[in-house]
Image (spheres, coloured by chain):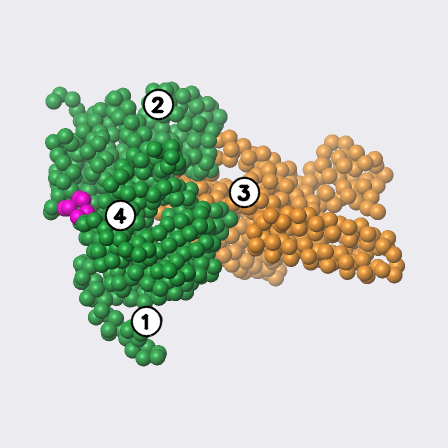
Amino acid sequence: MTMNPAIELKGISKSFGPVQANKDITIRVMPGTIHGIIGENGAGKSTLMSILYGFYRADAGEIFVDGKKISIPDSQAAIAAGIGMVFQHFKLVENFSVLENIVLGAESGALLSPSLSKARAELATLASEYELNVNPDAIIEDIGVGMQQRVEILKALYRKASILILDEPTGVLTPAEADQLFRILKRLREEGKTIILITHKLREIMDITDTVSVMRQGEMTATLETNKTSPENLAELMVGRKVLLRVDKSPAKPENPVLEIEDLNMFDDFGVQRLKNVSLSVRAGEILGVAGVAGNGQSELLEVLGGYRKANGSVKIKGSEIDLSTGVAGDGQARRAQGIAHVPEDRQREGLIMDFMAWENSVFGYHREKSNQANRFFMDNNAIRKDAEAKLDRFDVRPLDTKLRAKNFSGGNQQKIVLAREIERDPDLLLVGQPTRGVDIGAIEFIHQQIVALRDRGKAILLISVELDEILSLSDKIAVMFDGRIMGERLPSETNEKELGLLMAGVSGEAVQ
Amino acid sequence: MIDFLTLIQVLDGTLRLATPLLLVCLAGLFSERAGIFDIGLEGKLLAAAFVSAAFAAITGSVWLGLLGGVLASILLSLLHGLASITLRGDQIISGVAINFLAAGLTVVIAQDLFGQGGRTPPLKSGGRFEPLNFPWSISSKEMSDAGPLMQLYSELLSGHSLLVYLALLTVPLSWFVLYKTRFGLRLRAVGENPAAVDTAGISVVGLRYGAVVIGGILCGIAGAYIATSLQANFTKDMSAGRGFIALAALIFAKWRPWYALGACLLFGFFFAVDNRFQNILMPAWALSSLLIFISIVLLSYVWKKDYLDKVVLGGLALGIAIISFMVISSVWTSGLSSQVKIPVVFIQSLPYVLTVVVLAGFVGRAIPPKAGGQPYIKER
């Protein structure tokens, strides 16, 4: 091929102390293509892109843009080289207008108004060229995340980026918004832009990329043409062994209802209604998955059921009403006594105490139980430690060291500690939020198996996840939440991603059918 | 009744006393808009007051005094910057340290240099900012015979030191810089989301240091003003909490330049009233109806508010209503038109009461810059 690659990295290495985040990475991306980079958390994808965008400096290696060797000491140099980046967490000033955000850092002079009018004209051109319409005077905090992401893309294009890096762009989007993003990316490719897409979602790689690189433990393990590979193959390359992508489970055998929620309403501290007449029921031996875009009331539902938020309505556990009116510390304990276990959404803030050791973390919430007390005054630490070791072993926590502090375990192993604590108590109802957020593919498989095993022991499970794939593969019944309401309930066999996506976007059930 | 000349004199005092507040408030505005909380305004003001008075006393030049004050204040600002921007320390602690440093060092050095019990010697003419008298203005001796327009012109508009006019000019200037320039856009952005500024290829550290230095300059001018214009020497603790009051004014002003002018003039007015009058006499009916009016306004405001607001402001309204009834009952025998004395301490306490009311959300929530107080640590 005579064409120069748009971007070429040769032998990039980067260490943080003893940890080598990137080892001798070499990668070539041809202009006008979409190149995917896939890998587990901590595989070094983001470090690599941060080097390319001038956030970190590589210890060794060379960067070529359009065949010319350049050095990128800071973001300014990356922008000058035509590289634009859309971060996972948007870098926008929330109380500025769209126009001000686009102009920030790329002003044409010391005075603002000429810059703004120039940008306004430029924006109109970009909008028609790439079908990226956005109201330049809208304030960022008033527009949706899909629109905010569009502003980020426009920011890069306004700076004349020819290479666009997107870091996990679909994490915050509804399926419909993600489709729209992909249409935009395809359009950008048609216009000759080069796109690097970082993701951990295999499906996105298969859908949109031309070529794909796989990273594992700081190394580039393979670079392939997308149409010559398969999700199973990519997963194996990512993890280093064969992985089961679909959850292997038998049909559910649901029995009597364990959790019955009726007309649950909740207002937050600012008086905003977060739950609106929520009614749900979960039976023994059944997994109910609650789907929805983050921030539509799922977290609040978990918090109410877990006992640390006040609410109005009726919630019954195995037929007996629970008290929703207090919502203070201590209620969590009452809920546990009623057989409710809770794996919170944010394990680092709510599930664990990061500075405490694994064995201490493995007993929280149950530390007042008789079996953990040596006598009236003291806890039986030896017994707790021994018990913890057995529990963590059954949940394959690595390293199996009960004296290691929670913060020193990887995300997946932290989650296993929480799951071990909650599941090993054999609860009647397990509340579980985002069980695999930030967890490696290998650990996801294990966690899913444990949740299914609990169901097969005849327990009820309420699963909340923003990952639609997870909801679809684990649930026996799916409820979709939007704006604090249940938009509808579906059986996984009778629905598809498109229908759920519409429900998640707030389109009513009748309209969908 | 208060005559027109007295009113003019009070307003004149308002202007003079609001000047240091305004400069310090704008200093805080630049710093906090860039995300650096500045509790050390008081210390910088005090240090600048001392250094300018000392320089002016030694050299006999007020301009060298001003320069010295500004330099001293910038130096402390850079110290605050070093601690909170470069070393990413706690901004509150660094500010408090600066306040203590200034309070102690000024007195110690003043004693060592001049041996007058921690003061600087009185400044002679040339070492002070003299009042600028506008053309055709009249002296205070002729004032009582002049017409109201002449009184307004000569007393209120004319006859202030250069720094008063400078402070007033700083307001539109700050507004222009913040909202109409590239620097201002970046400054406001760095106080809201430094990561946005960083990824746009602009130095967060550079911008924040810039903002902190501007704050230092403004604080320095304010310090020079109180020692070489408002007074004619440095005395121990002469900043008298102005740095903290300016911070309150900054919150009151919701971090905006024109609002800051309004807030500082209001606070200055209370101080001027306090200076001019010992106790204020008012007819009992006027006082109690004023109090009841305030109480009703408060109550109607809190009607739709949160529980906490209801308790705090409702309690305040109830207290005011009770005072009003006490006023009425105290004049029950002598009739409602008899005069009641308002102790001047009430006027003195008003700025602080107002600040509390503002913080409780009376004039809409005061939302500080989002990234304020947090050091910027680059991640990914």
Q: Write down the residue under mark 1.
A: A369
- Nearest the viewer among B39 and B112 is B39
Residue A132 point in image, percent of width and height: 36, 25
Q: Where does residue A485 sit, x and y in percent of width and height? A: 41, 44
User: Which amino acid type corresponds to the residue marked 2 in the rendered image?
Assistant: Glu
Q: Which residue is mark 3?
A: B255
Q: Which numbered mark, 4 or 1, is in the foreground of this view?
A: 4
**Which residue is the site of mark 2?**
A131
Q: Residues within 10 Å of mark 2 (few under 14, many from 20)?
A: some
Circle 2 or circle 4, nearest the eye: 4
Span colored in magenta: A243-248
Tag 4 residue: A476
Q: Quadrant of residue A141?
A: top left
Q: CA distance from mark 3 to mark 2?
A: 38 Å
Q: Residues within 10 Å of mark 1 (few under 14, many from 20)?
A: few
Give the green chain's letter.
A
Residue drawn where x is 57% and y is 54% of the image: B307
**First of labels 2, 4 by sequence position:** 2
Q: Residues within 10 Å of mark 4 (few under 14, many from 20)?
A: many
Looking at the image, residue B344 lies above or below residue A14: below
Earlier along the polypeptide chain: callout 2 or callout 1? 2
Q: Nearer the viewer, mark 3 or mark 2?
A: 2
Q: Colour of chain B?
A: orange
Visible in this render: residue A39?
yes
Labels 2, 4: one chain: yes
SS of the residue under disc 4: loop
- Residue flagged by tag 3: what amino acid is it? Trp
* Residue A128 x %, y %: 37, 20
Query: Is circle 3 on the same chain as circle 2?
Result: no
B214 lies left or right of B267: left
Cα distance, mark 4 to mark 1?
Answer: 33 Å
Nearer mark to the viewer, of 3 and 1: 1
